Image (cartoon, rainbow, N blue to C red):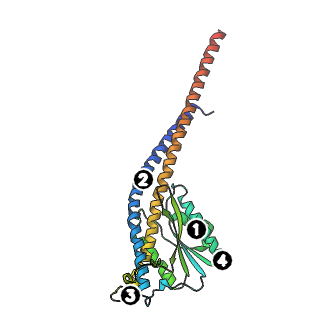
């Protein structure tokens, strides 16, 4: 049985750990509120962007864009996998890595070539250990998601697709559902296929007059829609990371409280045993006299 000094030292150590976990939980909660506001503001814009692109594409059948062109045969698939740079957020990064790993294995099983572009150190480290030969570009996450990050990733994706280096690009990230739920999601990024407009939509709503022309509009709108789609994924990942870290730190704080209670009980028992032993020694000595 450990002595009183060792138990007391461990109680102090657990108490300091508890202070850290409480502080991290508070910081993660504050960042979660900010990132949640950001993703809630970005979702309607991203959805409307796809809707507008779908309406323009339906109305202007004579206009085209390279990112709309689907390959007749898909030989090379690029995965853009998003994770966080930091840990201490439970199984958040492990879930997206496991989900993307299953998708990569499925594509490789179909005799296709895979390239993995990572946005986040955790998923980069995962594939560096398991599929280093498939790794492509890397885009480390900053302290706060900026639109420029999404634009940089989108430019690289568009350039590789238009050059014929890849035949399909898929985006894998964790969708923020709630503070307790983050769900891995897979989206076909390129060829960029806007969601079909409502089949019952009035044809008059599609009769746009576009200046200077539909082709010029698509040249501007399609790259921007691609950037917005990636930006949304980064924001979803950011909100999910802070939510997962807050939940993990809350669980860690509860564990330290339970551990402190157990150690305190152990300390009191050891202290009582030591006192009892001393009393027995005193009584035995007195009786011997």
Q: Which residue is mark 3?
A: 214
In front: label 3 or label 4:
3
Label 4 to label 2: alpha-carbon separation: 43 Å
The disc at residue 157 is: none
Q: Earlier in the sequence, mark 3 or mark 4?
A: 4
Q: Which residue is mark 2?
A: 29
202 in relation to 274, above or below = below
**x, y percent for residue 41:** 38, 65
Badge 2 element: helix
Label 3 to label 4: alpha-carbon separation: 38 Å
Q: Residues within 10 Å of mark 4 (few under 14, many from 20)?
A: few
Q: Observer-nearest residue: 85 or 161?
A: 161
Label 3 to label 1: alpha-carbon separation: 37 Å
The number of numbered badges drawn on the structure is 4
**In the displayed structure image, the side of residue 133 where residue 66 appears, left or right:** left
Badge 1 element: helix
Q: Earlier in the sequence, mark 2 or mark 3?
A: 2
Badge 3 element: helix
- Contact flag, marks 3 and 4 (Cβ < 8 Å): no
In front: label 2 or label 3:
3
Q: Earlier in the sequence, mark 2 or mark 1?
A: 2
Q: Which residue is mark 1?
A: 100
Q: Residue furthest bottom?
A: 62
Quarter the N terminus occupies: top right
- Contact flag, marks 4 and 2 (Cβ < 8 Å): no
Label 2 to label 1: alpha-carbon separation: 27 Å
Q: Earlier in the sequence, mark 1 or mark 4?
A: 1
Q: Observer-nearest residue: 222 or 9?
A: 222
Q: Earlier in the sequence, mark 3 or mark 1?
A: 1
Quarter the C terminus occupies: top right
Residue at 40 percent of width and 73 percent of height: 48
Badge 4 element: loop
């Amino acid at each position: 049985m450990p002595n009183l000094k060792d138990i007391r030292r461990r109680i102090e150590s657990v108490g300091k750990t508890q202070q850290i976990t409480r502080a991290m939980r508070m910081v993660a909660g504050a960042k979660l509120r900010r990132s949640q506001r950001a993703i809630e503001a970005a979702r309607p814009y991203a959805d409307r962007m796809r809707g507008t692109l779908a309406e323009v594409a339906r109305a202007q059948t004579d206009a085209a864009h390279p990112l709309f062109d689907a390959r007749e045969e898909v030989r090379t698939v690029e995965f853009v996998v998003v994770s966080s740079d930091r840990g201490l957020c439970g199984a958040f990064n492990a879930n997206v890595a496991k989900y993307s790993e299953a998708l990569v294995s499925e594509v490789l099983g179909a005799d296709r070539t895979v390239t993995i572009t990572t946005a986040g150190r955790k998923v980069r480290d995962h594939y560096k250990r398991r599929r280093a030969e498939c790794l492509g570009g890397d885009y480390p996450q900053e302290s706060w998601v900026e639109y420029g990050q999404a634009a940089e990733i989108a430019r690289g994706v568009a350039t590789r697709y238009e050059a014929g280096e890849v035949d399909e690009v898929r985006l894998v990230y964790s969708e923020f559902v709630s503070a307790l739920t983050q769900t891995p999601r897979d989206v076909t990024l390129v060829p960029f296929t806007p969601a079909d407009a409502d089949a019952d939509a009035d044809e008059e709503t599609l009769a746009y007059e576009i200046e200077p022309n539909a082709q010029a509009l698509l040249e501007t709108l399609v790259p921007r829609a691609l950037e917005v789609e990636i930006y949304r994924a980064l924001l979803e990942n950011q909100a999910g990371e802070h939510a997962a870290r807050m939940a993990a730190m809350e669980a860690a704080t509860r564990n330290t409280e339970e551990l402190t209670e157990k150690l305190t009980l152990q300390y009191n028992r050891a202290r009582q045993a030591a006192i009892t032993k001393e009393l027995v020694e005193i009584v035995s000595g007195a009786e011997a006299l």
